[in-house]
């Protein structure tokens, strides 16, 4: 049932999902679904838990930046498959087991790296905001991939930004077109900046407290 609900949402967005529609796809009566979930909100909880379960957990034996880089890239790829989930990832008040395991692993990675509880929270918020924001922006782009962008830049965008009126925009578009620019490459650029800034905070005296780590004395 949850797998079919995911397929509907992936094709049509979460607004296209209803209990009646799901029942029709399953060849069942709508009322029969309520033996498994109390309502659509509970179904969404289960769907979001599946999405969290698809995201790679940060490896315990990696450097914290490498671990969070892998986790962030995985989250981006998962949300590209399930763009409807972006707005729901932080909305669930009854998180499922995969959701909780994911959050525990991320927090553990940051705490083991030396972030205090407060700084680990800041880092988690910042990373998630970046990943979700990037995924949302990519989902809303009017093209699919670098090749389609190149065609639109040449045929659609450049004629709208003549060099005489918009010299910098025209220059940028022309140069990026010639270089085969792919917006997906922006993810790693921004992610490296975020991780680098967090490393500076982690390593700056006065921003961390070791005493609030589990098992620390005092």
Image (cartoon, rainbow, N blue to C red):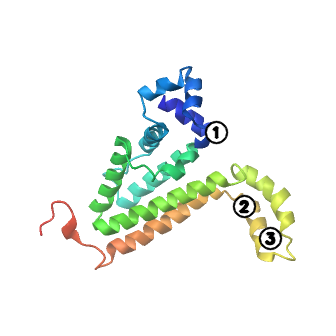
Residue mark closest to the camera, 3 vs 2: 3
Q: CA distance from mark 3 to mark 2?
A: 14 Å
Q: Which residue is mark 2?
A: 179
Residue sitting farthest toward the left: 217
Q: Position of residue 126 (x, y in %)?
A: 45, 65
In terms of secondary structure, where does tag 1 sit? helix
Q: Which residue is mark 3?
A: 170
Q: Is residue 215 above or below residue 209?
A: above
Q: Which residue is mark 1?
A: 12
In terms of secondary structure, where does tag 2 sit? helix
Badge 2 or badge 1: first in the primary sequence? 1
Q: Is residue 115 visible?
A: no
Q: CA distance from mark 1 to mark 3?
A: 36 Å
Disc 3: CA contacts within 10 A as few (<14), some (14-19) or many (>=20) = some
Q: CA distance from mark 2 to mark 1?
A: 34 Å
Quarter of the rendering containing residue 168: bottom right
Q: Position of residue 172 (x, y in %)?
A: 74, 69
Residue shown at 35% from the left, 64% from the top: 121
Residue mark closest to the camera, 1 vs 3: 1
Residue mark closest to the camera, 2 vs 1: 1
In terms of secondary structure, where does tag 3 sit? helix
Residue sitting farthest toward the bottom: 206
Q: Position of residue 135 (x, y in %)?
A: 57, 54
Towards the viewer: 10 or 198:
10
């Amino acid at each position: 049932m949850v797998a079919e609900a995911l397929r509907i949402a992936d094709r049509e967005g979460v607004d296209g999902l209803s209990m009646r529609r799901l029942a029709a796809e399953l060849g069942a009566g709508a009322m029969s679904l309520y033996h498994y979930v109390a309502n659509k909100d509970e179904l969404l909880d289960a769907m979001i838990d599946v999405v969290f379960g698809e995201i790679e957990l940060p490896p315990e034996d990696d450097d914290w930046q490498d671990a969070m880089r892998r986790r962030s890239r995985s989250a981006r790829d998962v949300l590209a498959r399930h763009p409807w989930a972006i707005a729901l990832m932080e909305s669930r008040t009854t998180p499922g087991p995969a959701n909780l395991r994911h959050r525990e692993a991320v927090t553990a990675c940051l705490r083991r790296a030396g972030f205090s509880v407060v700084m680990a929270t800041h880092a988690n918020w910042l990373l998630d905001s970046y990943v979700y924001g990037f995924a949302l922006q990519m989902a809303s782009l009017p093209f699919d991939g670098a090749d389609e962008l190149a065609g639109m830049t040449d045929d659609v965008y450049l004629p709208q930004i003549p060099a005489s009126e918009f010299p910098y925009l025209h220059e940028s578009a022309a140069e990026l077109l010639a270089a085969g620019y792919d917006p997906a490459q922006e993810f790693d650029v921004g992610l490296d900046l975020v991780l680098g800034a967090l490393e500076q905070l982690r390593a700056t005296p006065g921003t961390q407290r070791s005493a609030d780590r589990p098992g620390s004395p005092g």
